[in-house]
Amino acid sequence: RTRPSHRQTGREPMSSERHIQQSGLYSNRLNIDGRTGRKSAMDAVYEIEDVLVLDKIRHPLRLRMLYQLGDEARTVKELAERLDVPVTRLYYHLDQLQSVGLIEVVDTRKSGARLQRVYRAVATRFQPGRSLFQAPDPPRVAEVVASTVLDGARLDATAGVLSHLGDQQGEPVPGTLGRTMVPISREAALEFTRKLEDLVAELETREDPDGEEYAFSFVFFPRVAPVRGETP
């Protein structure tokens, strides 16, 4: 079966690519980084050159699966335990990720009378390749990239707010959610973008394997004018 195009490379992302960045779940940025701060022979960057491949990633559960399979090779049962979901829920998503070459079977393990496949992500970092931004359908690419970031962020935000509302009597849940709009110059926007990237880099240095997993999703672009008929 022919797979959509991609490249694996050890280079650092171009600055223009870093500005369309994610996580989630898996992640921190679109560089979707499955094992933040950890180095290994698998730390090659997987460059996504086809919007169809990116479309496979954007499902929030698949992002979490990539995160776990970038960290360690796992059977479906082990993956289900890590994600706290039924095993039967994962088979379809594993097939979707494998169909475009994002994960692969690296081993088998015997469990009773059956052999279980052991899956692993093909890289620990995933990012859009340069050719993706030259695709003939820019609105489609933009929509898929944005939903990769925001679909997972929506789930994280909803869970965070519910946790906060349900724990009014206990310790406050660390975290924040908000939206701010302010007119600034292009120079100020570039400076803020650099500071935001530095902040993300600082967050990555604080990784604690025994800590609770947090997600930091962000969007910082010029505000889109309201659609006619909508309230600004």
Image (cartoon, rainbow, N blue to C red):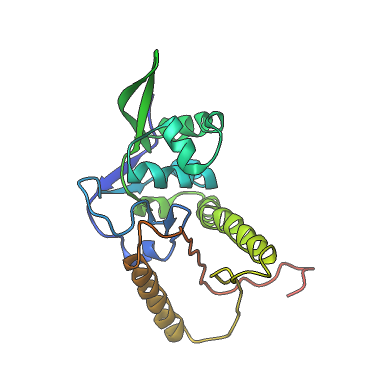
Near-viewer residue (87 or 193): 87
User: Which quadrant: the N terminus?
Assistant: top left
Residue 52 visible in rendering: no
Near-viewer residue (146 or 141): 146
Residue 7 visible in rendering: yes
Near-viewer residue (68 or 171): 171
Residue found at x 72% / y 67%: 227
Residue found at x 58% / y 53%: 151
Q: In the rendered image of this protein, does residue 229 appear above or below residue 209?
A: below
User: Which quadrant: the C terminus?
Assistant: bottom right
Spot occupied by residue 146 in the image (x, y as percentages of width and height): 53, 57
Residue 110 lies in quadrant = top left
Spot occupied by residue 161 in the image (x, y as percentages of width and height): 65, 64
Spot occupied by residue 158 in the image (x, y as percentages of width and height): 64, 59
Residue projecting furthest to the left? 41
Spot occupied by residue 12 in the image (x, y as percentages of width and height): 26, 60
Near-viewer residue (107 or 21): 107
Q: In the rendered image of this protein, does residue 36 appear above or below residue 108?
A: below
Q: In the rendered image of this protein, does residue 76 appear above or below residue 221?
A: above
Residue found at x 51% / y 47%: 58
Residue projecting furthest to the front? 170
Residue projecting furthest to the top? 113
Residue found at x 55% / y 54%: 152
